[in-house]
Amino acid sequence: MPKSVIVNLLHLFAIACLLIVCSGCPRNADNTVTVVLQGESMLTQQVAQHVAPSLLDDANWSHLTWSQWGWGNVKLTIAPVTDPESMRDRIGFGDVTKIEGRTVYVKVSPIRGTLAVIYARTIKVISDLFAR
Protein backbone atom coordinates (compact mmCIF):
# COMPACT_ATOMS: atom_id res chain seq x y z
CA MET A 1 0.00 0.00 0.00
CA PRO A 2 1.42 3.47 -0.86
CA LYS A 3 2.65 5.59 2.03
CA SER A 4 0.13 8.39 1.30
CA VAL A 5 -2.79 5.98 1.64
CA ILE A 6 -1.50 4.76 5.01
CA VAL A 7 -1.01 8.35 6.20
CA ASN A 8 -4.55 9.26 5.11
CA LEU A 9 -5.98 6.23 6.90
CA LEU A 10 -4.10 7.18 10.06
CA HIS A 11 -5.52 10.72 9.83
CA LEU A 12 -9.05 9.35 9.45
CA PHE A 13 -8.50 7.04 12.42
CA ALA A 14 -7.23 9.96 14.54
CA ILE A 15 -10.25 12.08 13.60
CA ALA A 16 -12.62 9.22 14.43
CA CYS A 17 -10.96 8.75 17.83
CA LEU A 18 -11.19 12.48 18.50
CA LEU A 19 -14.89 12.51 17.65
CA ILE A 20 -15.54 9.56 19.94
CA VAL A 21 -13.62 11.17 22.81
CA CYS A 22 -15.20 14.61 22.31
CA SER A 23 -18.70 13.19 22.22
CA GLY A 24 -18.16 12.46 25.90
CA CYS A 25 -16.92 15.96 26.74
CA PRO A 26 -18.84 17.32 29.71
CA ARG A 27 -21.07 20.06 28.24
CA ASN A 28 -24.34 21.28 29.64
CA ALA A 29 -26.00 24.58 30.47
CA ASP A 30 -24.41 24.62 33.93
CA ASN A 31 -20.84 24.56 32.65
CA THR A 32 -21.09 26.33 29.27
CA VAL A 33 -20.23 30.00 28.86
CA THR A 34 -21.04 32.21 25.89
CA VAL A 35 -18.54 34.96 25.12
CA VAL A 36 -19.79 37.67 22.77
CA LEU A 37 -16.97 39.53 21.02
CA GLN A 38 -17.80 42.95 19.64
CA GLY A 39 -15.48 45.08 17.54
CA GLU A 40 -14.03 45.43 14.08
CA SER A 41 -15.19 42.49 11.96
CA MET A 42 -11.87 41.09 10.71
CA LEU A 43 -10.20 41.47 14.10
CA THR A 44 -13.00 39.70 16.01
CA GLN A 45 -12.77 36.81 13.52
CA GLN A 46 -9.02 36.57 14.02
CA VAL A 47 -9.35 36.72 17.81
CA ALA A 48 -11.96 33.93 17.67
CA GLN A 49 -9.79 31.79 15.42
CA HIS A 50 -6.34 32.32 16.93
CA VAL A 51 -6.71 33.63 20.49
CA ALA A 52 -9.93 32.03 21.81
CA PRO A 53 -8.37 28.54 22.17
CA SER A 54 -6.14 30.02 24.90
CA LEU A 55 -9.30 30.54 26.99
CA LEU A 56 -9.74 26.77 27.37
CA ASP A 57 -8.76 25.11 30.64
CA ASP A 58 -7.72 21.82 29.08
CA ALA A 59 -7.64 21.47 25.31
CA ASN A 60 -8.15 17.71 25.63
CA TRP A 61 -11.47 17.94 27.48
CA SER A 62 -12.74 21.36 26.51
CA HIS A 63 -15.17 22.47 23.86
CA LEU A 64 -14.99 25.65 21.78
CA THR A 65 -17.17 26.75 18.88
CA TRP A 66 -17.63 30.16 17.34
CA SER A 67 -19.99 31.79 14.92
CA GLN A 68 -20.30 35.25 13.47
CA TRP A 69 -23.38 37.36 12.93
CA GLY A 70 -23.79 40.95 11.89
CA TRP A 71 -20.81 43.23 11.43
CA GLY A 72 -18.08 42.57 13.99
CA ASN A 73 -20.00 40.26 16.34
CA VAL A 74 -18.66 36.81 17.14
CA LYS A 75 -20.18 34.36 19.61
CA LEU A 76 -17.91 31.83 21.33
CA THR A 77 -19.30 28.86 23.21
CA ILE A 78 -16.83 27.45 25.73
CA ALA A 79 -17.16 24.44 28.04
CA PRO A 80 -16.50 23.44 30.71
CA VAL A 81 -16.35 26.69 32.68
CA THR A 82 -17.60 26.55 36.25
CA ASP A 83 -17.52 30.29 36.96
CA PRO A 84 -18.21 32.86 34.20
CA GLU A 85 -16.48 35.54 36.33
CA SER A 86 -13.22 33.61 35.87
CA MET A 87 -13.30 34.55 32.18
CA ARG A 88 -12.69 38.19 33.12
CA ASP A 89 -9.08 37.39 34.13
CA ARG A 90 -8.40 35.33 31.00
CA ILE A 91 -9.46 37.97 28.49
CA GLY A 92 -6.48 40.16 27.70
CA PHE A 93 -7.50 41.08 24.16
CA GLY A 94 -10.32 43.44 25.15
CA ASP A 95 -12.51 44.77 27.93
CA VAL A 96 -15.29 42.81 29.59
CA THR A 97 -18.24 45.20 29.37
CA LYS A 98 -20.73 43.05 31.30
CA ILE A 99 -21.52 39.56 32.50
CA GLU A 100 -25.14 38.44 32.42
CA GLY A 101 -25.66 34.97 33.82
CA ARG A 102 -23.40 32.72 31.76
CA THR A 103 -22.83 35.26 28.95
CA VAL A 104 -19.71 37.44 28.92
CA TYR A 105 -19.67 40.52 26.65
CA VAL A 106 -16.26 41.72 25.42
CA LYS A 107 -15.30 44.82 23.46
CA VAL A 108 -12.22 43.74 21.49
CA SER A 109 -9.44 46.33 21.75
CA PRO A 110 -7.88 47.16 18.36
CA ILE A 111 -4.36 47.27 19.83
CA ARG A 112 -4.55 44.48 22.44
CA GLY A 113 -6.59 42.29 20.07
CA THR A 114 -4.06 42.69 17.26
CA LEU A 115 -1.14 42.00 19.61
CA ALA A 116 -2.91 38.90 20.99
CA VAL A 117 -3.45 37.57 17.45
CA ILE A 118 0.18 38.22 16.51
CA TYR A 119 1.36 36.49 19.70
CA ALA A 120 -0.92 33.46 19.20
CA ARG A 121 0.11 33.05 15.56
CA THR A 122 3.80 33.40 16.44
CA ILE A 123 3.53 30.72 19.14
CA LYS A 124 1.75 28.44 16.65
CA VAL A 125 4.49 28.90 14.02
CA ILE A 126 7.24 28.24 16.57
CA SER A 127 5.52 25.14 17.96
CA ASP A 128 4.96 23.84 14.41
CA LEU A 129 8.66 24.33 13.65
CA PHE A 130 9.74 22.37 16.73
CA ALA A 131 7.18 19.63 16.05
CA ARG A 132 9.00 18.67 12.87
Image (tube, helix red, strand yellow):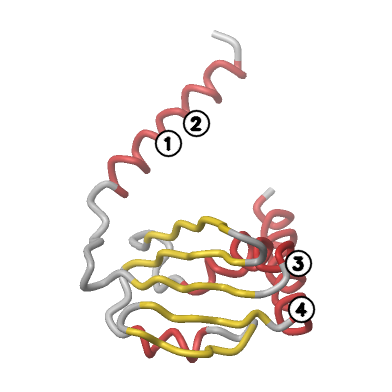
Q: Is residue 112 shown above or below 124?
A: below
Cα distance between the residues tagged 3 and 4: 10 Å
Q: Is residue 27 shown above or below 89?
A: above
- Secondary structure at badge 1 equals helix
**Left or right of residue 25: residue 89:** right
Mark 3–mark 4 CB contact (< 8 Å): no
Cα distance between the residues tagged 4 and 2: 33 Å
Measuring 40% from the left and 87% from the top, which residue is drawn there?
A: 99
Which residue does the numbered mark 1 point to in the structure image?
14
**Which label's residue is closer to the chain start, 1 or 4?**
1
**Which label's residue is closer to the chain start, 3 or 2?**
2
Tell me where residue 31 sits by quadrant: bottom left
Which amino acid is tagged 1?
A: Ala
Which residue does the numbered mark 4 point to in the structure image?
115
Circle 1 or circle 4, nearest the eye = 4
Which residue does the numbered mark 3 point to in the structure image?
122
**Which label's residue is closer to the chain start, 1 or 3?**
1
Which residue does the numbered mark 2 point to in the structure image?
11
